[in-house]
Image (cartoon, coloured by chain):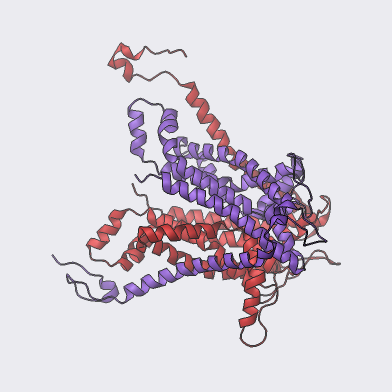
């Protein structure tokens, strides 16, 4: 038998020892360079932000409140607390609903039924709806329609709806990665459908779900656009104490500082960005660690 | 719980009969269905929040004037409500972003999926994820305070980008969506069964040919979905353009000038606490409805494409 070489690319006759193919390493190098550009960008971005923010990266940033008149005294404490509260609430709302939806769609839904198809199409579509449109939803329905007003809970509900498709899609992928033979084995031993899901499918899918949920929440942390419409008011000098308080969050505080003309505020923005990125890096590391530690390869 | 059927001990014939009804199972299924209706309610909510103010807007402004007007100045007297400048801003920034993100993202995906040794993969993949996780407000800051001055410095000859310009915003937006393209395409490529690759290798294909002629076509549905999602993200991206592209709605396609996109108009107009009854308040919803409609169309196209090319592996 003769090995069929890649005739389309080289036009060479079939033979066992392949010809030299200069395209191969060139192609590989091109791919690698593309990846390196992305990495390099990340490095430049991080170095730039840290060097810019360095002069203001001290305790004032998390001990003080924003000040418009005195950039040297301004801090982001209200924004840091606001972010923590909003994200905690968002997690409470979106993770259970997301996981339940994923279980329903993967384990129960009959794809032939029109309503299941609609749910599925709808989630695919929602995942790509621009975040600012969720701001409009929050403004029109949650804040004004339901009447929760421009408050912490409105922000958390809006962000929950925003990241819900991300949670659902990640959870579905995690569930789908569990091979069918596991389910069939469990069912064959007499387990009911829910017992199979609860004892076999979910334990195997939890690492993937957790990774997805953390990544979804870190998206919510960095999200500013919808909250612009939901009055994460410019100048909040207290940390929120209840669900119906007004609030601000880190990305909005950063946005406000970027808009100020004075250079001191830009330094402040860079310093706050470093804090925001540190929080996100920590969350991402946990997610990646979880995945690498617990993910099963079937 | 009570059982209507005889206990299993009654014999094989008993165990083969339909088991007792399990109401718990039905309740669980129903609860799960209700949870999944939240996402449907979200879409309904979006539409419901958009329609009434949009209708109020179109009571005063003609649909055709809105869609074909080249002057967007709702706050001037007399106001003008032609949305084309905002569309131009969106198109220009999106086009630049896609030109950056699709080639780089696809190349990165092919490298990670087909070439990278496990160790290399384990280094690069998290980097892409970190890139994806960076808040867009940070990208905006970077575009405004580093990239724009840099472009102004190196720009050959006179001119060069303005302080706020679509070019910087678009380029940075492109970097922002590289991970979207890369990681979704890579997932799709990783899902291609190894048998297909091995079959191609057995026929003597090189690695490049396997990647380009076997893996990419087999993963095409995922790749198309990734690209369309990337476009949709670029169209809907707000913070980068609000920070770096400026707030002047201009009917131009010159990426060096300041431009306003649909999203940055909504963001700028929505920040002030506009009274619900005011007409300006409805402009947010009219532009929002258009934005939602455009992304909706793109998603529908993407979903159809995915269906068309989907290959099921088991």
User: Relative to A271, is A24 above or below?
Assistant: below
Q: Residue furthest bottom?
A: B157
Q: Residue furthest left?
A: A1
Front in this rendered view, residue B287 or A263: A263
Residue at the image point whose x is 71% and y is 60% from the top: A255
Image coordinates for residue B65, horizontal then vertical, percent = 74, 65
Front in this rendered view, residue B39 or B180: B180
Chain identifier of the red chain: B
Q: Residue furthest right?
A: B77
Front in this rendered view, residue A191 or A288: A288
Image coordinates for residue B218, horizontal then vertical, percent = 37, 58
**Quarter where residue B283 is shown:** bottom right
- Image-based side of B71 in relation to B157, left or right: right
Residue at the image point whose x is 66% and y is 53% from the top: A133
- Image-based side of B211 in relation to A97, left or right: left
Quadrant, the C terminus of chain A: top left
Image coordinates for residue A213, horizontal then vertical, percent = 54, 45
Residue A211 visible (yes or no): yes
- Image-based side of B128 in relation to B239, left or right: left
């Amino acid at each position: 038998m003769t090995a069929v070489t890649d005739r389309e690319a080289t036009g060479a006759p079939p033979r066992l020892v392949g010809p030299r193919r200069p395209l191969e390493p060139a192609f590989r190098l091109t791919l690698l360079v593309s990846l390196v550009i992305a990495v390099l960008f990340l490095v430049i971005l991080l170095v730039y932000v840290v060097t810019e923010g360095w002069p203001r990266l001290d305790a004032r940033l998390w001990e003080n409140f924003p000040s418009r008149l005195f950039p040297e005294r301004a801090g982001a404490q209200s924004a840091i607390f606001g972010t923590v509260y909003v994200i905690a609430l968002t997690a409470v709302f979106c993770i259970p609903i997301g996981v339940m939806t994923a279980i329903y769609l993967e384990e129960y839904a009959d794809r032939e039924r029109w309503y299941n198809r609609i749910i599925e199409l709808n989630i695919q579509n929602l995942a790509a709806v621009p975040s600012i449109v969720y701001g409009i939803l929050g403004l029109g329905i949650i804040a004004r329609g339901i009447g929760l007003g421009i408050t912490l809970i409105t922000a958390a509900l809006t962000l929950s709806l925003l990241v819900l498709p991300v949670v659902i899609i990640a959870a579905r992928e995690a569930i789908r990665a569990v091979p069918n033979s596991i389910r069939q084995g469990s069912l064959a031993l007499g387990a009911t459908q829910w017992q199979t899901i609860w004892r076999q499918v979910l334990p195997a899918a939890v690492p993937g779900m957790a990774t997805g949920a953390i990544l979804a929440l870190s998206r919510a942390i960095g999200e500013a656009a919808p909250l612009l419409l939901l009055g994460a008011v410019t100048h909040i000098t207290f940390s929120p104490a209840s669900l119906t308080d007004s609030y601000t969050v880190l990305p909005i505080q950063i946005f406000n500082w970027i808009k100020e003309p004075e250079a001191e505020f830009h330094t402040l923005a860079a310093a706050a960005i470093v804090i925001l990125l540190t929080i996100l890096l920590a969350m991402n590391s946990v997610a990646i660690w979880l995945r690498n530690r617990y993910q099963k390869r079937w | 719980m009570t059982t209507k059927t005889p206990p299993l001990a009654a014999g094989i014939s008993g165990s083969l009969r339909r088991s007792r009804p399990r109401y718990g199972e039905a309740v669980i299924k129903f609860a799960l269905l209700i949870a999944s209706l939240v996402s449907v309610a979200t879409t309904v909510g979006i539409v419901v929040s958009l329609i009434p103010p949009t209708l109020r807007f179109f009571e005063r402004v003609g649909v055709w004037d809105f869609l074909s007007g080249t002057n967007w100045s709702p706050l001037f007297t007399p106001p003008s409500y032609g949305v084309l400048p905002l569309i131009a801003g969106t198109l220009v920034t999106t086009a630049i972003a896609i030109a950056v993100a699709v080639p780089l993202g696809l190349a990165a995906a092919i490298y990670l999926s087909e070439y990278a040794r496990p160790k290399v993969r384990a280094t690069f993949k998290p980097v892409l994820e970190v890139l994806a996780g960076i808040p867009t407000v940070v990208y905006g800051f970077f575009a405004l305070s580093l990239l724009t001055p840099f472009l102004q410095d190196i720009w050959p000859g006179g001119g060069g980008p303005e302080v706020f310009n679509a070019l910087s915003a678009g380029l940075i937006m492109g970097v922002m969506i590289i991970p979207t393209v890369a990681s979704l395409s890579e997932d799709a490529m990783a899902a291609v069964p190894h048998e297909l690759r091995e079959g191609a290798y057995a026929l003597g294909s090189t690695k490049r040919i396997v990647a380009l002629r076997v893996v990419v076509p087999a993963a095409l549905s995922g790749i198309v979905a990734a690209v369309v999602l990337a476009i949709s993200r670029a169209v809907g991206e707000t913070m980068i353009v609000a920070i770096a592209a400026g707030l002047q709605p201009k009917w131009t396609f010159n990426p060096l000038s300041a431009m306003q996109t649909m999203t940055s108009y909504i963001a700028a107009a929505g920040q002030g606490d506009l009274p619900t009854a005011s007409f300006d308040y409805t402009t947010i919803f009219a532009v929002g409805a258009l934005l939602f409609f455009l992304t909706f169309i793109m998603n529908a196209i993407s979903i159809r494409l995915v269906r068309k090319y989907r290959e099921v592996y088991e």
